[in-house]
Image (spheres, rainbow, N blue to C red):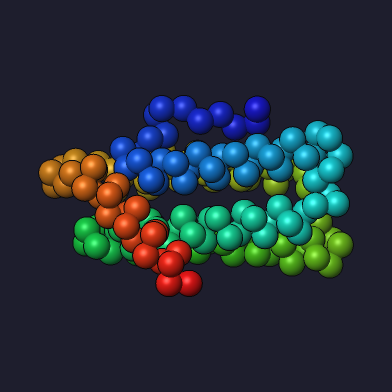
Amino acid sequence: MFVKWRDIYKVGIGEIDKQHMTLFAIINDLHEGINSGAAQANLNNIFGQLMEYAADHFSTEEDLLEKISYPGATKHTDEHGAFIAKIQHCQMKSKLGHLMISMRLMDFLKDWIIDHILGSDQEYAEYLKQNNVSTNAISDAVLIMNSYEHTNN
């Protein structure tokens, strides 16, 4: 396993933690594809899956941060935007045949997700604790938001 989920990555919001675990799984699938030689042939599909899931997850987090009036929301959103831009750039290079999946790309994905969760995500988790916001209530609200979005799309 290339990147392993550990309890220290939990932000304490069940749905967001599950989304993070899914992002770890996508990165591990990509790594497994590299090792088996299958990744390059499926690169566009893998990038599409990563883009779609990251966009959904980022939307969930950003909606949450807005609802709780988190003071670091703009910085957090900017980090998400930079990640999406990097993946879009890689996806475009892939479509043009100018990108080979490399360990450098895999290290970027691994480092970004771990650094982001242990940094920015833990910061908003701490903000919730300091402001006595119930993570159970937040988790329920996230599930409701996601359910509503999926039924209206």
Q: Residue furthest bottom?
A: 152
Q: Residue furthest left?
A: 132
Q: Position of residue 84 (x, y in %)?
A: 57, 61
- Quadrant of residue 129 in the image? top left
86 or 11: which is nearer to us? 11
Q: Residue at x 55, y 45 (%)?
A: 23
Q: Residue at x 13, y 44 (%)?
A: 132
With respect to residue 57, does 153 lie above or below? below
Residue 83 at least partly seen: no
104 or 28: which is nearer to us? 28
Which quadrant holds the N terminus?
top right
- Quadrant of residue 126 in the image? top left
Q: Is residue 136 left or right of residue 92?
A: left
Q: Position of residue 147 (x, y in %)?
A: 39, 59
Q: Is residue 88 left or right of residue 152?
A: right
Q: Residue at x 62, y 44 (%)?
A: 26
95 or 112: which is nearer to us? 95
Residue 94 at least partly seen: yes
With respect to residue 67, does 127 lie above or below? above
Q: Position of residue 70 (x, y in %)?
A: 24, 58
Q: Residue at x 44, y 41 (%)?
A: 18
Q: Position of residue 92 (x, y in %)?
A: 74, 67
120 or 47: which is nearer to us? 47
- Quadrant of residue 47 in the image? bottom right
